Amino acid sequence: MAKLVSVIIIHHDRLSLLNSQLNNYLAWNDLSNIEFIVISSPLACSQSKELIENFQFISFIFLESNLGPSTARNIGLKNSTGTFIQFIDDDDLITYEKLKTQAAFLMRNPEIDVVIGGTQRTDWSLTELPKKDASRIRYPNFDEINHCGQLLETNGFFQIGAALFRKDALLVVNGFDEDRWLIEDVNLYLRLFSNKAKFKVDKNSSFGLFWRMNTNEYSLSNRNQALFLEGCLLNFFYCINNNLLVTDADCEVTYSGIFNILNQDVSVNQALYQKGINILKEQSIHYLPQYAIMGKLIGFNGLFKLTSLYRKIKSILIKR
């Protein structure tokens, strides 16, 4: 039987946090129009059996290996029946009121494909749920998306759990890019935007999403910098390749972003690095930091080596 909302939860090696989240759903007022799908990386037979017995209202799909967040979410999407899709990680929490009011918003506004609500970064124990603190609730710095640069700016980022998606919009772009293990959410937003999907921030919908910095091996908070920076480069390249750079703001955030990534002391994939260098060579200095003009004179490889050397010398002098 089809449901109104499908909640797709991805789980990898954090069983206590998953149990805590699922227990929270037991207290919800009405589950009749919501389906829950957990996509889990491998568990011991006893653990999977216990989950199935304790949470019989949830559909579990146990994978034979860790396929990454994008593939896991796509498996959930393919197995869902909901008109609207809620993605959430196993260490976060959403509220019943969020789903109820965001689903109502999408039903009232059929032209909107993605509605985004507030988030609160916090921490909580397995026995005590987090409490809403209005002073800590955050929204992205836009009301709607009109150009790609809004999705690339730091202040425009929103956790995927803050949003409720129209399933049809996700299916048109074939869900997540399964090659992405980090920044896969921003890539999804860009592909939806490229396909004319409409985003809307609704500050009137009920809060929301509690999220925390985590220790997952593929999380940004674990500082897996190279993989993270490569994901950012691929998102910048996507915007360029798909002619999404329309405004000066789009160009500035994209080209300066490429410059800043390549100028870090982090080894990224050589092919991506060289592609970034080639792009910078062709761009106007207008969209780059002022000192990037040196790259036009001595080459960007030379500039990045000089700035790396400068940082190392500065670090040595500070330690003295």
Image (cartoon, rainbow, N blue to C red):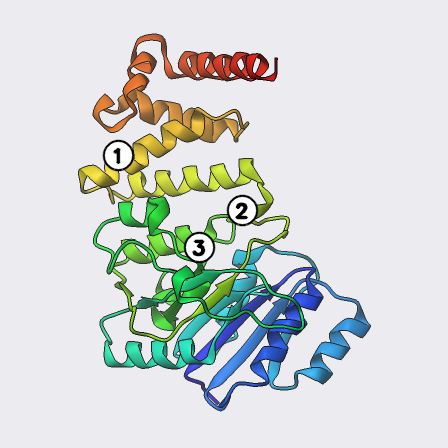
Q: Quadrant of the C terminus?
A: top right
Residue 132, percent from left and from top: 46, 70
Q: Is 212 situated above or below 270?
A: below
Image coordinates for residue 130, horizontal then vertical, percent: 55, 69
The label number, if any, that marks residue 66 in the structure image: none
Tag 2: amino acid: Leu
Q: Is residue 171 left or right of residue 178?
A: left
Q: Residue at x 70, y 60 (%)?
A: 13
Residue at the limit of the structure toward the left, as seen here: 247
Using the numbered discs, state the Cα–Cα distance from disc 2 to disc 1 in whole angstroms: 24 Å
Q: Is residue 174 visible in this depiction of the protein?
A: no
Disc 3 crowd, CA 10 A, few/some/many (<14, 14-19, 20+): many
Q: Earlier in the sequence, mark 2 or mark 3?
A: 3
Q: CA distance from mark 3 to mark 1?
A: 22 Å
Q: In the image, what residue occupies the spot 27% across and 23% down?
A: 282
Image spot of residue 283 (x, y percent): 25, 25
- The tag earlier along the polypeptide, 3 or 1, is 3
At label 1, the amino acid type is: Glu
Q: Say which residue label 1 marks.
A: 252
Q: Amino acid at mark 3?
A: Asp
For disc 2, the marked residue is 220
Within 10 Å of the Cα at label 1, are there few (<14), some (14-19), or many (20+) other Cα atoms? Answer: some
Residue 185: mark in rendering: 3
